[in-house]
Amino acid sequence: MRTYRRLCVHLSKRDRKELRQLLRKGFQPVRTILRALTLLQLDAGQTAGEVATHLQLSSKAVREIGRRYEQEGIERALHDKQRPGAAALLDAGQKQRIIAMVCSDPPAGRARWTVRLIAAEAVRRKLVPRAGRETIRLLLESHDFKPWRKKNVVRGGTR
């Protein structure tokens, strides 16, 4: 069994006041509320195991919240770091070339462009190394572009 050093969190008056105000506010993410409650209970002298039992968290999560507060402050203890997200699949030049291709006539034997056809044709013409349907769909949607749709204007009859 692993032994841990006793976790002692001592909140400053300002941090304690900020946590209490946060708990009184309206809607907050559950994750933030649980972290605030964890810090307050640790400050009250409860052990990580007791806090974990009361809040239905793991002891490891409680210790991690306390460690982040001690090392990096209240903001880091309450909130996650910003995540970078996935890298863009198409750069600006590739996007422009695909849009220009779609503005031209569709390949011979085709009446109109489809998302699948655009993806296949962009790879065939070596505009992009690879392109999926969803990537192309999002690109066209961001430009409010619907090459597969023909405008059908219905006019009222003259009776």
Image (tube, rainbow, N blue to C red):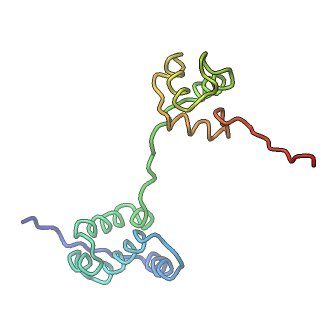
Kindly identify the residue that appears in the image at 31 percent across and 84 percent down. Answer: 44
Where residue 156 appears, x then y in whole percent?
86, 48
The quadrant of the picture occupied by the N terminus is bottom left
Where residue 97 appears, x then y in whole percent?
62, 23
Rendered position, 122 above or below 48 = above
Rendered position, 10 above or below 135 = below
Give the side of residue 84 with respect to residue 100, left or right.
Answer: left
Q: Residue furthest left?
A: 1
Q: Quadrant of residue 5?
A: bottom left
Q: Quadrant of residue 143?
A: top right
Give the side of residue 63 with respect to residue 74, left or right.
Answer: left
Where residue 37 appears, x then y in whole percent?
37, 78
In this view, the residue in front, 127 or 76, is 127
Rendered position, 40 above or below 119 = below
Q: Residue furthest right?
A: 159
In this view, the residue in front, 65 or 84, is 84
Q: How many marks?
A: 0
Kindly identify the residue that appears in the image at 27 percent across and 72 percent down. Answer: 57
Kindly identify the residue that appears in the image at 46 percent across and 81 percent down. Answer: 20
Kindly identify the residue that appears in the image at 68 percent across and 40 percent down. Answer: 144
Q: Residue furthest front?
A: 159
Q: Quadrant of residue 107?
A: top right
